[in-house]
Image (tube, rainbow, N blue to C red):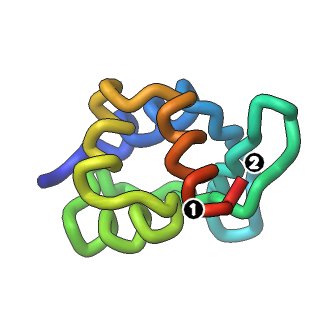
Amino acid sequence: MNFKTSRIKSALVKKGFVETSGANHDKYIYYTQEGKKTSVFTFFSRGSSLKEYGESLLGPMRLQLKINKDQFSGLINCPLSQNNYEDILKSQGIV
C-alpha cells in the first residue's frame, strides 16, 4: 500500500495535526480538542522529491501516530474521523 505524500499531509491536517517547521523536517504536531499539544507527531522531509510513501516509510509513521495499518488507511482515506482517532489515542492512555 502506497500513499501520495500530499494526500497524507492533507489528511493529517484535516484530522487535527498542525504543521510546524523544524531544522531538517516539516513536523506535524497533534493537538487535542482542548488545544493542548500531545506527544503524537510525525515527520516529513523538507524539500524532498519523494512523491509517494511506501511501506518502508509508512511503517515508522504508523508507529509515530500510534495506530495500526488498517487505522492508518482509515485516517488517510477518511473513514476514521478525528474523534475516532482521539478515541484510539485515549484508549492507549496517550491523550
Query: Residue 20, which numbered label?
Result: 2
Instruction: Please tell me how crowded label 2 is: few (under 14), some (14-19), or many (20+) other residues with Cα within 10 Å.
Output: few
**Residue under label 1:** 92
Amino acid type of disc 1?
A: Gln
Q: Secondary structure at mark 1?
A: loop
Mark 1 or 2, closer to the camera: 1
Q: Position of residue 48 (x, y in %)?
A: 44, 59
Residue 78 left/right relative to 85? left
In front here: 74 or 6? Answer: 74
Assign the N terminus to one quadrant of the image. Answer: bottom left
Q: Measure how far apart labels 1 and 2 are at the Cα level.
A: 25 Å
State the image quarter where residue 6 is shown. top left
Number of numbered tags placed on the structure image: 2
Q: Amino acid at mark 2?
A: Thr
Residue lying farthest left?
1
**Residue 75: % across, % down:** 38, 38
> Crowding at label 1, few (<14), some or many (≥20) Cα neighbours within 10 Å?
few
For marks 1 and 2 on the same chain, the one whose residue lies earlier in the sequence: 2
- Is label 2 in a helix, a strand or a loop? strand
Left/right placement of residue 33 relative to residue 3 reads: right
Task: Tell me, yes or no, whether the two marked residues, 1 and 2, touch with CB atoms within 8 Å.
Answer: no
Q: What residue appears at the point 44 percent right and 32 percent down from the top-left corner? A: 11
* Residue occupying the point 48% across, 33% down: 84
Question: Does 54 appear above or below 30?
Answer: below
